Structures are given as structure tokens and as C-alpha cells.
Image: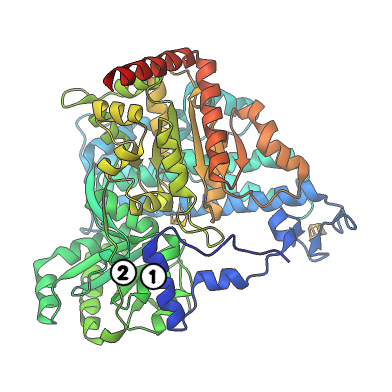
């Protein structure tokens, strides 16, 4: 029997407080279920196959093959492929829905949305060689919607969006035969290959998996990010606050949760309307407070500065504050348990996507045409629900941390360049001379098997204490915000003096929140921008950079890990993918794949060791670029200078 949890402490006191409150009230949380979960060894190792009815088959020393003869590596690889297919589908379907909204706007079928960022529209249109000179914005938008929709279907050519990758990277993909020819196509093909009796060579199948993951990162996710920017604006630095304490006792509280910002954006607008605020006051509330959970929160935060109530594991706890009138959920990372939690309170949980219904949730049949009216009516019924609040059950932790988010690639560009010129030069120079040792992307979920935020935050602290600039997305970004690492002053204190100094000089904080999970595409774009600026090699694999998802949980995280590896990065996961029973596959992902792609996976759960793996990797890349001596000299000079200071 395997234990599911390492321990049950949290690094976030607000979470501990609400878990205690839940216990006192006899309410169950994700941690309780995790503690009583008996984990199946075959599942952990990826050795259970139920792809046909001769099985299910479980691989062990006694039974090294399934009924059909499939071995451990084949079975583990097939299971992994299916996880990546699901993760790619989630991000990409999200992207598709945004393209649909873009089309509705272009065709004048909705006035709930508009083209907010025309510059971004033109940038993306030029990628698809769409004529823009002297044309109406909406005509360009319609052509762009056509071009983006075409990326989903099958084409004779590789997907156009791949052209954003460095030339050298595109050549690597071409040589390995992993250029996707369409997002949907790459997923369908992968599902075909994992059907009983098709692709049994684990290494060959892994190439299909990599292909689908590229369709995710450089396709579906990048499209989701780009179209969100066009419709809702490209993020700029914005001040907000985080943790359960943002839920306001005297206000009507709405919480948005999930990933797709389309309806939530209208809800945010509806909450700000004077008529709605007046109505809330007429019901005895001080106003309306909108906050978010997970990546819908990140989307609302990045563009509107909407406060964040918490990350993935805090969704049940938000309702347990007893002060949430309505939680609006769209897609992904929503626990069905919210229904039973909400049943103990007055909270209405409303599912807003026609894709995602859950027993015990109400549903609204969302449509873009009437989005704003729907949003207004939802806000109004949330206000009506304020009167039903059970006042004696309200407990809101006194935890609220201010922080800065909104670091799109454009925002970083402009901050680095000052008022007159946008450029990555100061960042590249700081990396070359070694004051910034390298860059790490820390991303991904939370997992009840780990202390909440308990491995993300120490890793990020360790990285900035060792001169590494950190880029964040998803729930990991929320973890760091709660820990104060996104408040520029606190971050500067936690950073090494060298990193703090250079960040101040070039004008960016040492830890940057870049957005939601689909916005991992922004990390890819940032890497491309650094390369274009020059001096740090020609390909992502040349960069002194790495990625980590210390508390990963979802299939999307598996797909993200894959496309970062396929793009040439080291990706460190806090616990292994469910493949370790396939020893050859495990060796391939943690070693062999590096030769072809320049990137690879590493599994490690201890912070100090994680840190060492990432720093060693960064130093190895610096060495290969011939910029390590510079750093050594710089460190020596700094020591001298400090010695003189004293
Ligand atoms: Fe979900 Fe995006 Fe994971 Fe958080 S981090 S638990 S996927 S919300 Ni992407
Ligand atoms: Fe068993 Fe092979 Fe069927 Fe999988 S596909 S369940 S290994 S017989």
C-alpha cells in the first residue's frame, strides 16, 4: 500500500486555518480524500493498461507482458501519450473558443466584446501574412480567425505558428519529424496510435507525443494567449492582492474559477456598473467583490487587476469562508466536490461552459451574443443571494498580500527599454556578464500530496538567492504571490544582492508573473525574444534556462513539460511522470531525448537537490556559451567591492 501524502502541513497559514475550520465543522476537503486514498503502484508506474477488453493488464515481474504481448515500455508510453493528448486538447480547445469569440466580433455578431488591442491583432496577422494596409480592423480580424481555425485542422504543411520558433529549433523538429500539421490532427493521430494493436515502439510513439505537445505549446496555447490579448488587452504591470482574505465580509462576493476568460470578463465589467453596486447597497452590502481561483483568476488579474482568492487547492476553502454568494466555474481544474461543499452554505455554484456540467452545480447556457446581459443577470442573482448568507458560518482568514502581476513579453520589453525604446538588451547583457546567472520558469499546479506552495516557494526563493531570474505562470505564480515574492520590495530582499541590484538597474522585479497556464506560451516567446536580441546562442537549448513544475497535478502539466523539453529546455518535475515502470522510456525521457532535442526531464522532490539540478544545468549552458568566466570575474569583483564597503 502506498501513502498518498508526504505530510499535511501547509506553508500558507490561511489554508491551515480554513482546513481546521473544515475539520471542526466535519466537512471534507481534498486533503482528507488524499489521506485516505490508497495509491495503486501500477498507476504510479504507468503499468496498467485498459486499452482493450482482453485486459485490463497489469505488468509485474510475474506478468511482464499484457495479453497482447505489450511490454512495460509500450504500456507506459501509451498511457503517457494519452495524458499529453488530453492536456493538449484542453489548452487548444480553450484557444479554439477564443478564436470563435474573435470571429463573432469580426462578424458583428456580439457587442459584448471588441478588439481591445489592435497592435497585437496586426502583429499576429502579419505572422499569417494577412494583408493589413488600409483595411478595416474587423476584416483583418475575420481573416485572422480563418487562419487560426485552419491551424486546428489537418494541412499538408506544418502549422504556421511554428515559424515563431528559432530557425534552428524548426530544423530540429523537421529532422525529428515532429512538426505538427494541425492541432486536432496531432491529437487524433496520437489517439489512433495508442489504440490496441497499433504503435508499440515506445520511442517512436514518444515522437508522436512530442508532436502533439508542440501543437499545444506553439499552437493551441499560443493561440489562446494571442487572441486573449487581442480581445482583452495585452497585460501590463498591475497591482492586486491575493489569498482568501480578499473575500470581503461586508460585500457581495463572486468568485470566478477555471480557465476561459470569455464570460468572466463580462462579469468583471458587470460588477463595476454603478447600477449593480447600487443594487448591492440596497440589499445591505458595502459593494461587490469579484475575485478568482486558478487560471480564470490569472486572466482577470493580468488585465483587470482582479484580486486572486487562491490557487487550485484553495477552491473548496473559498466556499468554506461562508461569504461567497456565487462561484462561476468554466472549464478545467474544477473539483466536483464543490457541489457538496456549497450545499453546506448559501453559495450557488454556476457552471458557465456548455462543455462542463457537474451534478449539484447550476448551469447557464452561455452564448457570446448575449454575454453582457447574461453577466448582468448573474451578478444580480448573486446580489439577491446575499440575504441568504448564514452569518454565523462566516470565517474569512485575515490574509491578504499585495503584489504586482501583468508581465507580458511586451511589458517586459518596454520596461527593459525605458520610455523611448523597447528592447531586451539590458537583460541579455546582464545574463552575459553574469549578474543574472540564468532564467527559470516555475509553473504548474498544486497537489495535496505536497504541502500547499511548500515546494514552489522555497525553490523560487533558492533560485533568486542564486542570481536566477524567475518567470511564473499558473498556480505556482499564485503560490509565490501569497508568499510575498511578487511584491517587488520583498522579492528584492529575498534575492541575492547581485540580482536585486541588476533588477533595480534594468527596471524589472526578480520574479515575474506572466499569466495563466496557456500563457506558458509567453515563456516560449520570451525565450525567442532573448535569442533575437543576440549574444546568447541561436536556439532555446543554448540558453542558460530551465523549467520546473514542483507540485504538478494535471494532464495539461504533462503536455507543458513535454513541449518545453521538445523546445530544448530542462524540465524538472517535483514527482515523476507515471512512466517509471517503463525503464527504457524513463531513461529516454530523462537522458536520451536530450541528444535529439536538447531538453530533458528530471524528477526530484527535495528543494536543495532541485536547486542544484537547475543551477548545474544553467552553469553548463553558460560554460557552453563561453560566458562563465565573465561571471566568475564579476563575482570576484563584487566580493572585493563589498569587502571595501565594510
Ligand atoms: Fe490547474 Fe491553470 Fe494546474 Fe492550476 S496550474 S491546477 S492546471 S489552474 Ni496550470
Ligand atoms: Fe492488455 Fe494489450 Fe489489451 Fe492493453 S491492449 S489491455 S496490454 S491486451
Using the image, tell me which numbered label, if any, was put on residue 397. 2
Q: How many marks?
A: 2
Q: Residue at x 43, y 62 (%)?
A: 331
Give left or right: position of 631 versus 498.
right
Q: Report x, y in % for residue 413.
A: 28, 29
Using the image, tell me which numbered label, if any, was put on residue 17. 1
Mark 2 or 1 closer to N-term?
A: 1
Q: Quadrant of the N terminus?
A: bottom right
Q: Residue at x 41, y 35 (%)?
A: 465
Q: Nearer the viewer, residue 345 or 77?
A: 345
Q: Report x, y in % for residue 104.
A: 30, 54
Seen in the picture, residue 275 relative to 164 is either above or below; the reply is below
Seen in the picture, residue 479 relative to 163 is either above or below; the reply is below
Q: Nearer the viewer, residue 339 or 433?
A: 433
Q: Report x, y in % for residue 440.
A: 45, 35
Q: Nearer the viewer, residue 490 or 246?
A: 490
Q: Residue at x 87, y 59 (%)?
A: 67
Q: Nearer the viewer, residue 460 or 641?
A: 641
| C-beta proximity under 8 Å, tags 2 and 1 | yes
Q: Residue furthest right?
A: 62
Q: Which image quadrant for residue 396?
A: bottom left
Give left or right: position of 494 versus 610.
left
Amino acid at each position: 500500500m502506498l501513502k498518498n501524502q508526504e505530510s499535511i502541513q501547509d506553508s500558507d497559514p490561511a489554508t491551515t486555518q480554513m482546513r481546521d475550520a473544515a475539520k471542526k465543522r466535519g466537512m471534507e476537503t481534498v486533503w482528507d480524500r488524499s489521506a485516505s486514498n490508497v495509491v495503486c503502484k501500477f498507476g504510479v508506474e504507468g503499468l496498467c493498461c485498459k486499452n482493450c477488453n482482453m485486459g485490463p493488464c497489469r505488468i509485474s515481474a510475474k506478468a511482464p507482458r499484457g495479453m497482447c504481448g505489450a511490454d512495460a515500455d509500450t504500456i507506459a508510453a501509451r498511457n503517457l501519450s494519452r495524458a499529453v493528448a488530453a492536456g493538449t486538447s484542453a489548452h487548444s480547445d480553450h484557444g479554439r473558443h477564443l478564436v470563435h469569440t474573435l470571429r463573432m466580433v469580426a462578424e458583428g455578431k456580439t457587442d459584448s466584446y471588441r478588439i481591445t488591442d489592435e497592435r497585437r491583432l496586426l502583429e499576429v496577422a502579419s505572422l499569417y501574412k494577412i494583408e493589413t494596409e488600409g483595411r478595416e480592423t474587423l476584416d483583418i480580424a475575420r481573416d485572422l480567425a480563418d487562419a487560426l481555425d485552419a491551424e486546428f485542422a489537418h494541412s499538408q504543411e506544418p502549422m504556421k505558428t511554428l515559424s515563431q520558433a528559432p530557425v534552428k529549433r524548426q530544423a530540429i523538429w523537421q529532422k525529428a519529424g515532429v512538426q505538427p500539421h494541425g492541432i486536432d490532427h496531432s491529437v487524433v493521430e496520437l489517439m489512433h496510435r495508442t489504440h490496441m494493436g497499433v504503435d508499440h515502439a515506445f520511442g517512436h510513439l514518444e515522437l508522436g507525443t512530442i508532436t502533439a505537445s508542440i501543437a499545444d505549446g506553439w499552437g493551441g496555447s499560443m493561440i489562446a494567449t494571442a487572441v486573449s490579448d487581442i480581445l482583452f488587452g495585452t497585460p501590463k504591470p498591475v497591482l492586486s492582492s491575493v489569498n482568501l482574505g480578499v473575500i470581503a465580509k461586508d460585500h457581495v462576493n463572486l468568485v470566478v474559477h477555471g480557465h476561459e476568460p470569455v464570460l468572466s470578463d463580462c462579469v468583471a465589467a458587470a460588477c463595476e456598473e454603478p447600477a449593480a453596486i447600487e443594487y448591492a447597497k440596497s440589499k445591505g452590502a458595502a459593494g461587490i467583490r469579484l475575485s478568482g481561483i486558478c487560471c480564470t483568476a490569472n486572466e482577470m488579474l493580468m488585465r483587470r487587476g482582479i484580486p486572486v482568492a487562491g490557487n487550485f487547492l484553495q477552491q473548496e476553502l473559498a466556499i468554506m469562508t461562508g461569504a461567497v454568494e456565487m462561484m462561476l466555474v468554466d472549464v478545467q481544474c474544477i473539483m466536483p466536490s464543490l457541489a457538496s461543499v456549497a450545499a453546506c452554505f448559501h453559495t450557488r455554484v454556476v457552471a458557465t461552459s456548455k462543455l462542463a456540467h457537474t451534478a449539484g452545480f447550476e448551469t447557464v447556457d452561455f452564448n457570446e451574443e448575449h454575454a453582457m446581459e447574461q453577466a448582468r443577470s448573474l451578478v444580480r442573482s448573486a446580489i439577491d443571494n446575499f440575504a441568504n448568507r448564514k452569518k454565523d458560518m462566516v470565517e474569512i482568514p485575515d490574509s491578504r498580500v499585495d503584489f504586482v502581476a501583468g508581465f507580458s513579453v511586451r511589458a517586459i520589453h518596454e520596461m527593459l527599454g525605458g520610455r523611448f525604446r523597447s528592447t531586451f538588451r539590458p537583460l541579455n547583457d546582464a545574463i552575459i556578464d553574469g549578474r543574472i546567472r540564468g532564467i527559470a520558469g516555475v509553473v504548474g499546479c498544486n497537489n495535496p500530496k505536497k504541502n500547499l506552495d511548500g515546494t514552489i516557494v522555497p525553490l523560487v526563493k533558492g533560485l533568486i538567492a542564486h542570481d536566477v531570474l524567475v518567470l511564473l505562470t499558473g498556480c505556482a505564480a499564485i503560490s509565490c504571490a501569497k508568499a510575498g515574492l511578487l511584491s517587488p520590495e520583498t522579492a528584492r530582499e529575498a534575492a541575492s544582492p547581485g540580482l536585486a541590484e541588476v533588477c533595480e538597474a534594468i527596471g524589472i522585479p526578480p520574479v515575474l508573473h506572466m499569466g495563466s497556464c496557456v500563457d506558458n506560451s509567453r515563456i516560449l516567446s520570451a525565450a525567442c525574444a532573448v535569442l533575437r536580441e543576440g549574444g546568447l546562442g541561436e536556439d532555446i537549448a543554448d540558453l542558460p534556462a530551465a523549467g520546473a513544475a514542483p507540485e504538478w497535478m494535471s494532464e495539461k502539466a504533462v503536455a507543458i513539460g513535454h513541449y518545453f523539453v521538445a523546445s530544448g529546455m530542462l524540465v524538472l518535475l517535483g514527482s515523476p511522470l507515471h512512466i517509471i515502470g517503463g525503464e527504457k522510456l524513463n531513461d529516454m525521457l530523462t537522458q536520451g531525448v536530450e541528444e535529439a532535442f536538447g531538453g530533458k526531464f528530471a524528477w526530484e522532490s527535495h528543494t536543495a537537490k532541485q536547486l542544484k539540478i537547475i543551477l548545474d544545468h544553467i552553469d553548463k549552458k553558460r560554460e557552453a556559451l563561453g560566458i562563465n568566466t565573465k561571471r566568475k570575474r564579476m563575482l570576484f569583483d563584487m566580493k572585493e567591492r563589498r569587502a571595501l564597503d565594510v
